[in-house]
Amino acid sequence: AFRPDGRAVLSGGADQSVRVWDTQTGRQLTLLAGHVGPVISAAFAPGAAWIVSGGDDGRILLWRLVGNPSPVTLAQTDSWVRSLAVRGDGQWIAAGLDSGAVLLLKPDAAAAPLELPGHVGKVNSVAFAP
């Protein structure tokens, strides 16, 4: 996932970390550790103030890139988190799960996630319209 200005990219790995990379120098800018399994998906928020990540530990974590680096757990599921997307205004996060459900979450964790069941099998991709 690219930062909105294109100057950084996210990666999530089997080493249970999320990394932010400078796209011009290739230098690692940030290392985020907090998952207890491989990280499968990550996405920047508009403005790049925070990112969201998910993986096979079933956790959806929000990381603030300024201030407190500790992750906030937005959801703990019983299913792998395959895909994440952040709406253009940053007010919603969508997560595609191995269970066949899509979760809609608020980044401030003020409301319980809304579950949209219906797929038979894994949800490999979620997206918001621009």
Image (spheres, rainbow, N blue to C red):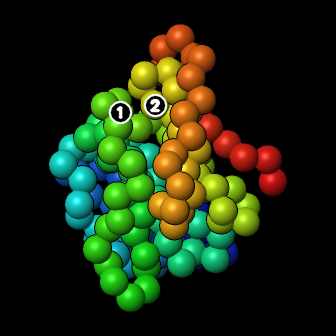
Q: What residue type is labelled 2?
A: Leu
The one of 82 and 109 positioned closer to us in this rendering:
109
Pointer 2: residues within 10 angstroms few (<14), some, or many (20+)? many
Residue at (54, 34) in percent of width and height: 115
Callouts 2 and 1 close, C-beta under 8 Å: yes
Residue with the most extreme bottom position: 67
Dot label at residue 12: none
Q: Position of residue 26 (x, y in %)?
A: 42, 72
Q: Name the residue under label 1.
A: 80
Q: Where is residue 83 in the image (x, y as percent from the top left)?
A: 50, 40
Q: What element carries label 2?
A: strand
* Vertical arrangement, residue 107 with respect to residue 57, above or below: below
The one of 5 and 50 positioned closer to us in this rendering:
50
* Vertical arrangement, residue 129 with respect to residue 97, above or below: below
Q: Name the residue under label 2.
A: 97
Pointer 1: residues within 10 angstroms few (<14), some, or many (20+)? many
Relative side of 129 to 10, left or right: right
**Real-space Cα separation, disc 2 to disc 1, in angstroms:** 6 Å
Q: Which amino acid does label 1 sit on?
A: Trp
